[in-house]
Structures are given as structure tokens and as C-alpha cells.
Amino acid sequence: MRAWPVFLSLLALLCLIPGCGAQEKISMQGTLIYERGNKLHAFDLATRIPKPLVDWPKLRSFLEVVDNDTLLIGSEGLAEPSRLALLTLSSLEVKDLRRGTEPLYMPRHRKFFFIQGSRETGPRLFLADLDHPEAEAREIAPDEGVISSDPIVRVSDDEIVFRKYQGEEDIPLYRYNLVTEHLERLPEWTFGKCIPCAWRSASSQLICETYGNNGYYLVSLDGSRVEPIDLPKGYLLLLAYSEKQDVLLMNKPTMGWLDGTFMLERYDLWAYSFKTKRRERVAEGIAPGVGGLVWLE
């Protein structure tokens, strides 16, 4: 009997170690809007409950936040040209803007970048005015080749980074300033294998995926600070990052049994907190593609 107090003391000491017992949830606020199954859905991060929002029968959509009641959406389809539209969430009203897809909104300027092209020209990068979307758009870097399918990332109020397409070889990033119209090629030795995912303003670093091997790291634009990110192992798809909460959201495939009969791959939503270095599975079965999820805070 005298061994029990010793055992209980050891157990109490072990549970002071991080990871013992129930894992505390990552503190997150806001609503996720994402595309799945020809619908836009809303996911409340406080209750962790999803609900259908509006029918959206498009083949593939890219969502971008204008404000907490307005989304800028670029859609692609096989039978129709790509379209850019505004969706007002409170009324579910949709307003078509122009042809194009993969929008990136610049709030300070009320302008947005987007992709448009043809089989002859390939995908090209343009800049348009949200208040006058029908006006002629400015083409960015017309002599620098077609744009890669990798994300375009806002790194400041005035600047973006993007990659141009060159097949399988290393592709350096380009930084573009919409005020000065200056285009700068970033050092290839640092950024040749960086697929840009998001900008972490808390540390002034770009969140990168390593081209070809699914590793993730942070890097400053001058290449001086490179730090690995301790994300869940396996194939991941980074979906959204919150500057206010310093949390990264991602999809991770998981194999499980369906009704106990056969194996089925599903995608789970995971979160990673840069502040606490914690990882958490937030929900099962949420599987938007690249650009198909936004975070309203």
C-alpha cells in the first residue's frame, strides 16, 4: 500500500509534461467559408459546426475576402469562361465583375490581381480596380512569361510575390510593387524551390512549401532567416493563415474505415499555432482545394 503515494506522485509529475492528458484546443475565432460539393459552407470556429451557405455549382472556385460581408470569387468551368464575382454574405447576392480567376485583393488600394489568359497566351497576371472592374486592367510583367499555378501572395499593403511557369526547373520568386510598378526577381539560391503560401507579418517572413518534397519553412524576403515549421507529417495542403491569431490552417489526408467495411481517404482540417507551437485536428471531412477557403474574423 505504501507504493501508491509514490505512484500517484510520479503520475502527477508526468502530467505536468506538455501533451499529457487531454490536449488543450488552439484558441481560434471567426468563421471559415469554403467550397465543397457545389456549395459554399460556413464553419464556426467557436462551435466547430459547419453549415451549408449557398449553392455554388462551379467546377473550381478561388475565394478572397474583401470585408467580413463580401467575398471576391473567381470561378473556372469546363463549359463557360472563368468569371470573377462579388458575393454579399448577408444577402447572398452575387454580382458579376469580369472574366478572370484566382483573385488577390489589395485592401489599401481597393484593387485586385487576377489571372486571365487563353491557349495561345497562357495564364497572365492583371491588376484591376474593384470600384471600376469593367475598366481595362493593367497587365503585370507582360515580357516575363506566363504565370505559374502556384499562389500569388500579398506581402505588404503594396506588394505581392508570385512565380512564373518554367516547367520542372527551379523558379525564383518575383516581387511586384503596384505603386511604383517595380518588378524584382528574388535570389534564386534562396527562393528557387519556394512555393509561396502566405505572409507571416508577425515575423516578416514568407511561409513556403519546398518545391517537390512537401516540406514547409519560413523565410525573410532578403533570404537571411530560414526556419522550418513543425507541421503534421505527411502530405498537406495549406489553406489559410490568420495574421491576427497567428494560426495556419491546412488539410491532411487520413485513411479510415467506412461503416467498418473498406478503407476510405478523407481530408481533415488541422490548425498550427505559431505562438504556442501546438497542432490540432479541428474537423473531419473538410476538403476545399487551393484558394477554396477563407477566414472571416
Image (cartoon, rainbow, N blue to C red):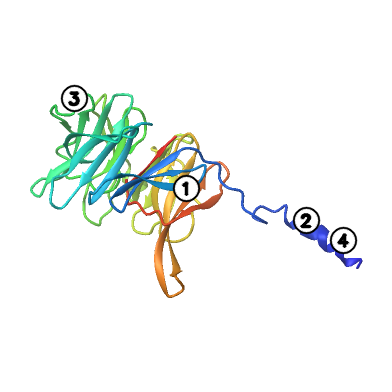
Badge 3: residue crowd in 10 Å (few <14, some 14–19, many ≥20): few
Q: Nearer the viewer, mark 1 or mark 3?
A: 1
Along the line of sight, the residue nearer the viewer: 276 or 163: 276
- How far apart are labels 1 and 3 at the CA level? 37 Å
Q: Residue 49 carries which label?
A: 1
Residue at the left extreme of this rendering: 120
Answer yes or no: do the residues labelled 1 and 3 have beta carbons within 8 Å?
Answer: no
Q: Where does residue 123 sit, x and y in percent of width and height?
A: 17, 45
Q: Mark 2 packing: few (<14 Cα in 10 Å), some, or many (20+)?
A: few
Label located before the other in sequence (1 or 2): 2
Whether residues under marks 3 and 4 lie with C-beta atoms below 8 angstroms apart, the answer is no
Q: Name the residue under label 2.
A: 12
Identify the residue under disc 3: 132
Q: Which amino acid does the dot numbered 1 rest on?
A: Ile
Q: What residue type is labelled 4?
A: Pro
Q: In which quarter of the image is the N terminus?
A: bottom right
Q: Name the residue under label 4.
A: 5
User: How far across and down, in percent of the image, does residue 287 sit?
Assistant: 37, 54
Q: Give the structural element (helix, strand or loop) at label 1.
A: strand
Q: Quadrant of the C terminus?
A: top left
Q: Dot 4 surroundings within 10 Å: few (below 14), some, or many (20 or more)?
A: few
Q: From this viewpoint, which residue is outermost toward the right?
A: 2
